[in-house]
Amino acid sequence: MTARVTFLAALAIPLILSCQPAHRGVTIRFWAMGREGEVVQELVRDFEKEHPGVHVEVQQIPWTAAHEKLLTSHVGRSSPDVAQLGNTWIAEFQALQALEALDPYLAHSEEVRPNAFFSGIWATNVVDHMPYGVPWYVDTRLIFYRKDILREAGYDSIPQTWEGWRAAMRALKRRVGDRRYAILLPVNEWTQPMIFGLQAGSPLLAERMTRGAFSGSEFRRAFQFYVDLFEEGLAPPVSNTEIANTYQEFERGYFSMWITGPWNLGEFRRKLPEALQDDWGTAPLPGPTGASSGLSMAGGSSLVMFKTSKHKGQAWALIEFLSRPDQQARFYRLCGSLPARTMAWRDSTIASDPMLVAFQAQLERVAPWPMVPEWEQIAIRLQELAEKSVRGTTPPDSVLAELDRDVDRILEKRRWLLTRRAASHTGSGG
């Protein structure tokens, strides 16, 4: 108790500083990735006006180099004060003890509260019940589809149960013929079978996230549903690198549905002809038992503070500023990144866009991937093995058993660490 009081008292100093002009200049180093790193500089200028004496040095980093650069800076103790971090990386950097725990800051914040964000997105920032990031913008997957072709097949919308959806895909297939398909599910993407697993109720990992759960009945059901779409000829067994121009093929009707993300809103508007603009739409993902089971992934980027920061008060003030609904809506207008803050969706630009209605509905039912540093390695392994079943060389049950064995090996160190930690707590080992 005493230690906590002391900690909070120490914390209060930078928090107070964040609310007052700095008499001596303070520079905060902020790393942001890709396009976001370019446009956020416009927002940062207004933060500096609100906080005289605080200068934010934004460094734009390519996504392809971001992970390695963040790791290198951590090892060299040269991490920035604040950074944009893909939310699947949070568990890894928390395990490295690179990130500042944010619970004490949240306890004093009137701006950043967990219930002001989509709950599934907020969960991606929490490791062992402690928040380490604040969602900045969100990403999820849903269906982009040809309304005209679906209508010709006898449907005015995407059915919201798996069986209804599959019936619609069969009708589409009958309408478009042998050389065209109902849906594109690129075999070099793991998100689709993994999302179906979430929808079927699979935990994906078992035993405190130390072993694979892919042979369990829930994931087996989901994986069979996924493989059946190929076996029935509803989806072509191709990777997206085998398609020269995905947008042209969508226009040509090679496929009528595509599970993809928000970045394609702008691409569809730019790359599809004007005559087709009223003939495509977006829809939330169906689920095994209806809309409420139609989960999708909770992706996106978060704002994190590094433990090594010497300006934590000012760094937290920047995170609060970028989390404000008006700034999140402005960020969307600048680069199209969807706001994590639910109130920002009331902005007229966002609320008036009919294509975003489905995204807002989908974001109300998203779930995080397991928060383990090894997650991306596990997901890629699913992708590699799933293709064997899609191409008919290995039965689904054999693929999932092999995947569980591989995942158990990948998570071996995690099991050892948890066992060692438990022994340490009971005093029976070290």
Image (cartoon, helix red, strand yellow):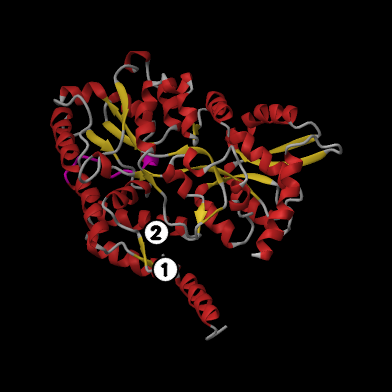
Residue at coordinates 29% horizontally, 19% vertically from top-left?
A: 279
Dominant secondary structure, magenta: loop
Residue at coordinates 23% horizontally, 63% vertically from top-left?
A: 397
Q: Write the start and end of the magenta stretch as one range.
A: 232-241
Where residue 203 appears, as percent x and y from the top left, is 34, 58
- Which-is-in-front pick, marks 2 and 1? 1
Is residue 75 visible in this depiction of the protein? no
Amino acid on which the number 1 mark rests in the picture: Thr
Which quadrant: the C terminus? bottom right
Residue on which disc 1 sits: 210
Residue on which disc 2 sits: 381
Q: Is residue 25 above or below residue 307?
A: above
Where residue 10 appears, as percent x and y from the top left, is 74, 54
> In the image as oriented, which residue stretches furthest toward the top?
275
Location of residue 370 (image quadrant) = bottom left
Q: Is residue 130 above or below residue 283?
A: below
Q: Is residue 11 above or below residue 352?
A: below
